[in-house]
Amino acid sequence: MKSANWRNAIILVMILLLSYWVSRHGLPQYYTPEWSARRLFWIASLIVVFPSIFGKPIFSATALAGYLVGMLTGELFGGFQQNLPPHYPHYGWLIQTLVFLLFCLVGLWLQRRFEVGPSDPKERQIQ
């Protein structure tokens, strides 16, 4: 494993821990960030960090973006008419999870599309 992989993983861990701290302790009044810090954070962290260690930085960056964008969109659009009778539930958790999974799929596609490797197709099959 290359040292660049470890450097990328450490940067991702620092960003994830900062987002955990902000969403868990800095934004407890908002539903989706707080729910995400309690329930989705550790699973998302594994999905983001391990591929980076094994040389898949595009996937990891896209998955991290999906986690953060999902948290934002879940909070913005998940509580639509939540305070009106009959008190509809907050769907921020569902929106965040779906956005995160969508970004993971896009990250897989991007990683395969832009992966640097041998230019000869026969050499690619050997690896």
Image: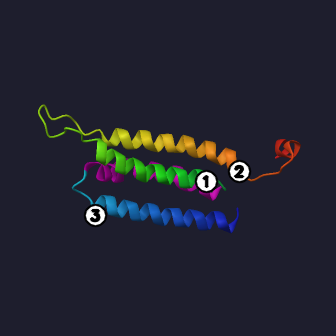
Hey, what amino acid is under mark 1? Ile
Instruction: Point out residue 61 in the picture as x, y percentages from the top left corner.
Output: 55, 55
Mark nearer the viewer, 3 or 2 = 2
**Mark 2 or mark 1, which is nearer the start of the sequence?**
1
According to the picture, the residue beneath numbered tag 1 turns out to be 58
Where does residue 125 sit, x and y in percent of width and height?
Answer: 83, 41
Q: Position of residue 48 (x, y in %)?
A: 53, 53
Instruction: Indicate the secondary structure of the residue bearing disc 3.
Output: helix
Residue at horizontal 55 percent and vertical 66 percent from the top = 10
* Residue that badge 2 annotates: 115
Depth check, mark 1 against mark 3: the one in front is 1
- The magenta region covers 31-54
Mark 1 is surrounded, within 10 Å at the Cα level, by few (under 14), some (14 to 19) or many (20 or more) other residues, namely many
Label 2's element?
loop
What SS does tag 1 mark? helix
Type of the residue with mark 3:
Gly
Q: Residues within 10 Å of mark 3 (few under 14, many from 20)?
A: few
Q: Earlier in the sequence, mark 3 or mark 2?
A: 3
36 within the magenta span: yes
**Marks 2 and 1: in contact by CB < 8 Å?**
yes
Residue under label 3, please give it. 26
Q: Residue most toward the top?
A: 86
Q: What is the x, y in percent for residue 3?
A: 67, 68
- Magenta stretch secondary structure, dominant: helix
CA separation in Å, label 1 and label 3: 29 Å
Q: Residue furthest left?
A: 85
Separation of disc 1 and disc 2 at Cα?
9 Å
Give left or right: position of 119 versus 97.
right
Q: Nearer the viewer, residue 123 or 53?
A: 123
In 3D space, how far apart are the residues under numbered discs 3 and 2 (Cα atoms)?
Answer: 37 Å
127 left or right of 35 in image: right
Nearest the viewer among 49 and 32 is 32
